[in-house]
């Protein structure tokens, strides 16, 4: 690990606008500093900054430093959010990792984490060995000729499905950005992953109120039952009225370079009966535009099946 300067601001005003890399739970940053993937000159430990609180009175408002395990355990949190959190990482990591840090976590692409290999995201212009290399875990949606890395966060998938927003503060003021707009496709600049401006601090995650999000779930398919990233996942919520679907929210993880909202699947579900056949018909459009790689040709079919499985699990007993 390279030497760095450590400071610990205690207020939002001290932290926002400061020059440096923010440290919250440290579950991503410290790993990447040890690997020398990230070599910040200055680290700002923000754990004393008052960015806590979970308010479920009108939707959901969560302070950026709230720990994953505390959010998951809160009884007022929508099920797709709590399930996505509980299916992430290990209990020890969930006890340490903050929601803000989770949303800022870096890709698990093995080439990105190995400084002995080229990687356009880590070293722009150096190439992308994953495109012709080991790419089983990589994305099939939103990819480019520069990068095919999968977005790693589970809870971001649920939050994108629910139209969550981030509150961002810097010395230039406060702004709010939809999480779906915050993440950027790799295009020709995969090193630019999000719309966080220099010195800007995530202070709060806000989920608009959606009563029927109480009827939601998150299904994660992975190579082992715990402590593993998604091969594919689906966050689903349904509003069912008189045995028909009146509203749907669907997003997928493990398949996209960003958390992948599926508006065409949502539209196909609205007005449909609550049947497996209707779920399969809607899911059939989920992977449109997918660009599978040599090692992940199974992902489009897995995406369709994961969505159907999530919808079936959510409607068990009402079909
Ligand atoms: Fe780097 Fe992206 Fe290629 Fe992985 S997929 S090696 S992160 S450029």
Image (tube, helix red, strand yellow):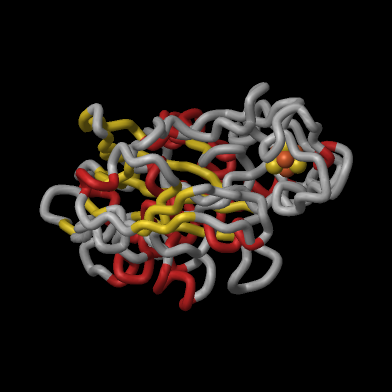
Left or right: 236, with 206 as reference point: right
Q: To which quarter of the image does residue 249 belong?
A: top left
Q: Which residue is at a point 39% across and 40% down the rendered structure image? A: 19
User: Does the rendering let one see residue 318?
Assistant: no
Q: In the displayed structure, would residue 175 be above or below residue 114? A: above
| Of the pair 94 and 158, the residue shown nearer to us | 94
Q: Which residue is at a point 59% across and 49% down the rendered structure image? A: 39
Left or right: 9, with 256 as reference point: left
For this orientation, the residue located farthest to the top is 188
Residue 189, position in %: x, y?
Answer: 63, 25
| Of the pair 225 and 97, the residue shown nearer to us | 97
The C terminus lies in which quarter of the figure? bottom left
Q: Ligand 1: which quarter?
A: top right
User: Does the rendering let one see residue 158?
Assistant: yes
Q: Which residue is at a point 32% across and 59% down the rendered structure image? A: 8
Left or right: 284, with 72 as reference point: right
Q: In the displayed structure, would residue 311 be above or below residue 187? A: below
Left or right: 264, with 160 as reference point: right
């Amino acid at each position: 690990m390279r030497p760095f300067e450590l400071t610990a601001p205690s207020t939002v005003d001290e932290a926002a606008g400061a020059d440096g890399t923010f440290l919250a739970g440290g579950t991503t940053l410290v790993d990447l500093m040890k690997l020398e993937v990230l070599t910040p000159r200055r680290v700002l430990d923000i754990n004393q900054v008052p960015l806590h609180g979970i308010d479920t009175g009108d939707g959901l408002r969560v302070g950026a430093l709230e720990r994953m395990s505390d959010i998951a355990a809160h009884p007022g949190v929508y099920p797709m959010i709590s399930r996505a959190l509980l299916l992430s990482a290990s209990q020890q990591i969930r006890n340490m990792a903050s929601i803000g840090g989770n949303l800022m976590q870096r890709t698990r692409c093995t080439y990105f984490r190995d400084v002995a290999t080229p990687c356009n995201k880590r070293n722009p212009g150096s190439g992308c060995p994953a495109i012709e290399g080991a790419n089983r875990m990589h994305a099939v949606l939103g990819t480019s000729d520069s990068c095919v890395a999968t977005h790693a966060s589970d809870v971001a998938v649920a939050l994108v499905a629910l139209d969550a927003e981030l509150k961002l503060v810097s010395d230039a003021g406060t702004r709010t950005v939809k999480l779906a707009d915050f993440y950027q496709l790799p295009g020709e600049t995969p090193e630019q992953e999000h719309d966080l401006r220099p010195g800007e601090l995530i202070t709060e995650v806000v989920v608009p109120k959606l009563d029927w999000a109480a009827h939601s779930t998150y299904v994660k398919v992975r190579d082992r039952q715990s402590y593993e990233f998604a091969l594919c996942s689906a966050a689903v919520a349904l509003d069912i009225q008189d045995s028909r679907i009146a509203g749907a929210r669907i997003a997928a993880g493990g398949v996209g370079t960003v958390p992948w909202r599926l508006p065409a699947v949502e539209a196909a579900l609205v007005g449909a009966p609550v049947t497996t056949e209707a779920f399969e018909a809607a899911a059939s459009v989920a992977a449109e535009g997918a660009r599978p790689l040599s090692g992940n040709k199974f992902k489009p079919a897995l995406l369709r099946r994961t969505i159907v499985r999530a919808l079936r699990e959510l409607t068990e007993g009402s079909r």
